[in-house]
């Protein structure tokens, strides 16, 4: 009897599972063509019964799952929304490629939602201007100018302990391309854009993400730089709430490779010779002179004896004759 009940329970469980699987729908969500600058960010996708649904299915997409995931949902009509995390002002709007906002999911069916960047930010679409910078007038490039692959960068001098997320904007004055560099504590408050184009670059602006009170102020040493001489903008950030904080440049001051290079480049190649070497060189002729003087003194000491001997020898020889 027990075996029969166990078998019956297993059969009912399998039947229930099969019925549930047939009634469920699957949805695969993905983000395509995400720019390099956003590949360190997280995308949140929600499937709910409406914009105010507090029990929506939340899907987290990031580099760990290659910005794609599949979920199982009950048959219903779902309101679909996607957004880049920590982008409350809509600088990076996302849109489904088929402009799917409401998804009528039927049991047993599979659906794909593919999101890409929708284009301009909300601020730009409303005002016609960029929120964080103002473009500089373009300049006429030299006659022989040909855009080539180049690298542009920025590094920061900041108060000790500064751990904020900084975004720096640089504009190519020949091509009108704008590059935004993200500086973190983890990258030493320094970043580069390796896929830029050669030309003349201008510093547009920099800001701390989430700094609504403008506590941090930026100053750039170079307003313009050319890739022919290397584009590496140096910025200094000041904490207006604590202006006397000690400053440092993490990418330079705390980088062992940079420190080793500085130590090598700044070594003293004009150091004077060791005193001992000078004494040894100077002492050689002094000792030789002392030996010459000793020999002369010895000859002078024996000169009278030689003269006396010569006189006696001459006298004796004359006497014999």
Image: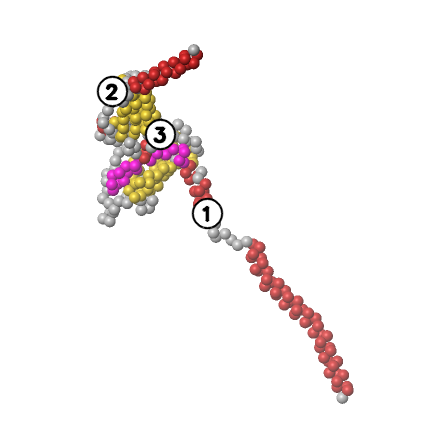
The residue that label 2 is drawn on is 104
Q: Secondary structure at mark 3?
A: helix
State the residue position of label 1: 264
Labels 2 and 3 touching (C-beta < 8 A): no
Identity of the residue drawn at 27% across and 17% down: 76
> Viewer-proximal residue, 267 or 77?
77
Q: Determine whether 13 is above or below 229 in the image.
A: above
> What number is the disc on residue 92?
none
Q: Residue furthest bottom?
A: 321
N-term mark: 1 or 3: 3
Q: Nearer the viewer, residue 299 or 264?
A: 264
- How far from the left and from the top, in percent, is residue 26? 30, 23
Q: Earlier in the sequence, mark 2 or mark 1?
A: 2
Does residue 197 show up?
yes
Q: Quadrant of the N terminus?
A: top left
Callout 2 secondary element: strand
- Position of residue 231 relative to residue 80, above or below, is below
Q: Which residues are magenta?
A: 168-188
Q: Is residue 173 highlighted in magenta?
A: yes
Residue 87 shows in this picture: no
């Amino acid at each position: 009897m027990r075996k029969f009940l166990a078998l019956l329970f297993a059969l009912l469980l399998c039947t229930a599972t099969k019925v549930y699987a047939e009634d469920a729908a699957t949805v695969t969500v993905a983000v395509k063509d995400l720019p390099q600058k956003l590949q360190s960010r997280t995308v949140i996708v929600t499937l709910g019964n409406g914009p105010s649904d507090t029990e929506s299915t939340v899907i987290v997409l990031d580099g760990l799952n290659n910005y794609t995931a599949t979920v199982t949902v009950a048959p219903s009509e779902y309101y679909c929304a996607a957004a880049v995390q920590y982008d409350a002002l809509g600088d990076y709007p996302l849109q489904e490629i088929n402009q799917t906002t409401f998804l009528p999911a039927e049991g047993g069916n599979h659906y794909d939602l593919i999101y890409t960047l929708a284009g301009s930010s909300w601020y730009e679409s409303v005002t016609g201007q960029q929120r964080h910078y103002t473009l500089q007038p373009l300049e006429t490039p030299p006659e022989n100018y040909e855009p080539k692959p180049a690298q542009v960068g920025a590094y920061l001098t900041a108060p000790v302990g500064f751990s904020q997320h900084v975004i720096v904007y640089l504009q190519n004055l020949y091509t009108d391309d704008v590059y935004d560099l993200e500086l973190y504590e983890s990258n030493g408050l320094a970043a580069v854009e390796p896929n830029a184009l050669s030309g003349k670059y201008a510093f547009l602006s920099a800001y701390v993400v989430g700094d609504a009170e403008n506590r941090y102020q930026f100053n750039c040493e170079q307003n313009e730089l050319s890739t022919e001489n290397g584009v590496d903008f140096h910025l200094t950030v000041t904490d207006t709430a604590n202006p006397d904080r000690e400053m440092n440049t993490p990418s330079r001051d705390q980088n062992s490779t940079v420190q080793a290079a500085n130590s090598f480049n700044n070594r003293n190649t004009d150091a004077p010779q060791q005193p001992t070497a000078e004494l040894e060189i100077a002492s050689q002729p002094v000792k030789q002179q002392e030996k010459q003087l000793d020999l002369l003194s010895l000859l002078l000491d024996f000169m009278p004896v030689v003269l006396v001997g010569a006189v006696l020898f001459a006298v004796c020889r004359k006497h014999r004759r």
